[in-house]
Image (cartoon, helix red, strand yellow):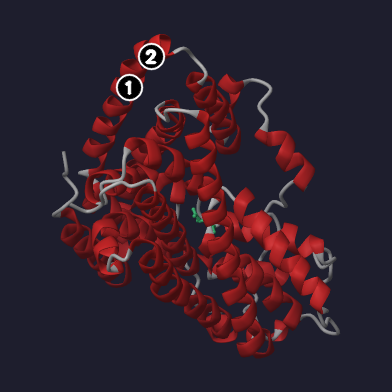
Amino acid sequence: MNILKQQYIQILCAIFLGFIVAISFDQSSIFIPFGDIFIRLLKMMIVPIVFISIIVGIGTISDSTNLSRLGLKTLLYYLCTSLFAITIGLLLTNFIRPGEYFSLDNLPNDINPQGVLSAPSSFVDMIYRIIPTNPFNAIVNGDMLSIIFFALIFGISITQLSTERKKSIEPILLSLYDSIMFITAFIIRLAPIGVFGLIIKAVHNSGTGIIPSIGMYMLTIFIGLLIHLFIVLPLIFYMFTSISPLFHFKAMRNAMMMAFSTSSSSATLPVTMSCVRDNVKVSKTTSGFVLPLGATVNMDGTALYECAGVLFIAQILPGIDLTFMQQLTIVFTALLASIGAAGIPSAGLVMIFIVLQSVGLSNVAGVDIIVGAMLAVDRPLDMLRTMVNVTSDSIGAAIIAKSEGENLYD
Ligand code: ASP
């Protein structure tokens, strides 16, 4: 069942049309509910998809050696690509030095950071949050890391059952999985209308007044994300699959456009799953394991952004010269922050406080104003970094599937 093949042209048109209507038609906000309803429908599917597909992905792995092999490959892929992305952010920001083009005095006076961003909790808190005291609460609250944690354990426990009992539970899980993907496919049909509304909302929510003072920062992040998306990830893909990356981009174009329109890896997950399964032809086992985990944990674009964003702030603040060790600390906290960031709009910007804290900059005067300015222009950056995040997950799924001997794209 592949309803996605012809849809990309419609989605592309919806993106363009959304931009045009938003900038030329005063009353365009009346279309915003189309986007909101579509997002609600996608979000409705996130928890069931993550929960069931991880259980199916792990539960259908034949033995624990295969499970550890798949787990190790996935982890290695996530770590390496995120570190590559962070390195790009580090080098570019040191080279372009966007902070030197920014002056706190040049900001328009409508920047009001107070109360816009809530500081995230500490790392220990994050670890506590991963282990749910009640998995049903985690499901009700949509607490992704806890849901993943419990689904992983549940899936692993299924692999420990006797073959006979495993055989009796497998068809039930697979039927549940197929029904959920059926609803998902139905919702995805509404994508062009939803995307139209979402783009109008994105344009309405973006501030443009401060672009002159923060343009260099935006450019640095854009260049970094584009290098990762169109050079680094395709190279990695080609190295491990010997397949032209163009095949992959073509197979994933709907998910990439959806990531761009929604700024949410989690909301895009239903579309990512469909593209990877139906177009890339990755098995349920591999896609069920790699993608839901990746949507929350593997965020290359966000990782690059965390590092570049903190260096940018440090460059603006007077008298701050980061040592090599401090930059190294930023690299590792940026990695952790990207893992902890939720797959929702602007989650990366909120997590930047954790990275700032690691080098003692979170409470320095002026930081909240700079972050407020970054928030005002975050939407377009978020659209691109989410696209990078989703593409990296899908490339990971393809590489890992290929290494497991799966036949792709036929
Ligand atoms: N919006 C991004 C995502 O969902 C996270 C971020 O803000 O960087 O992948």
Q: What quarter of the picture does the N terminus occupy?
A: top left
| x, y percent for residue 54 | 45, 32
Under mark 2, the amino acid is: Ile
Q: Residue at x 69, y 54 (%)?
A: 115
| x, y percent for residue 275 | 28, 49
- Foreground: 3 or 194? 3
Asked where in the image residue 333 lies, by quadrant, the reply is bottom right
Under mark 1, the amino acid is: Leu
| x, y percent for residue 308 | 63, 73
Q: Residue at x 23, y 50 (%)?
A: 279
| x, y percent for residue 73 | 51, 49
Question: Which numbered circle lies on residue 378?
Answer: none
Asked where in the image residue 3 lies, by quadrant, the reply is top left
Task: Identify whether 163 is placed above or below 205.
Answer: above
- Foreground: 328 or 101? 328
- Left or right: where 233 falls relative to 41: right
Asked where in the image residue 374 lies, by quadrant, the reply is bottom right
Q: Is mark 2 within 8 Å of ligand 1?
A: no
Q: Residue at x 39, y 57 (%)?
A: 395
Kind of element beneath mark 1? helix
Q: Is mark 1 within 8 Å of ligand 1?
A: no
Kind of element beneath mark 2? helix
Question: Which numbered circle lies on residue 176?
Answer: 1
Task: Identify whether 360 is placed above or below 265.
Answer: below
Asked whether disc 2 touches disc 1, contact meaning CB atoms under 8 Å apart, the reply is: no
- Left or right: where 380 falls relative to 249: right
Q: Residue at x 40, y 59 (%)?
A: 391
Question: Taking the image as drawn, is residue 343 in sight?
Answer: no
Tag 2 residue = 169
Q: Earlier in the sequence, mark 2 or mark 1?
A: 2
How far apart are labels 2 and 1 at the CA level?
Answer: 11 Å
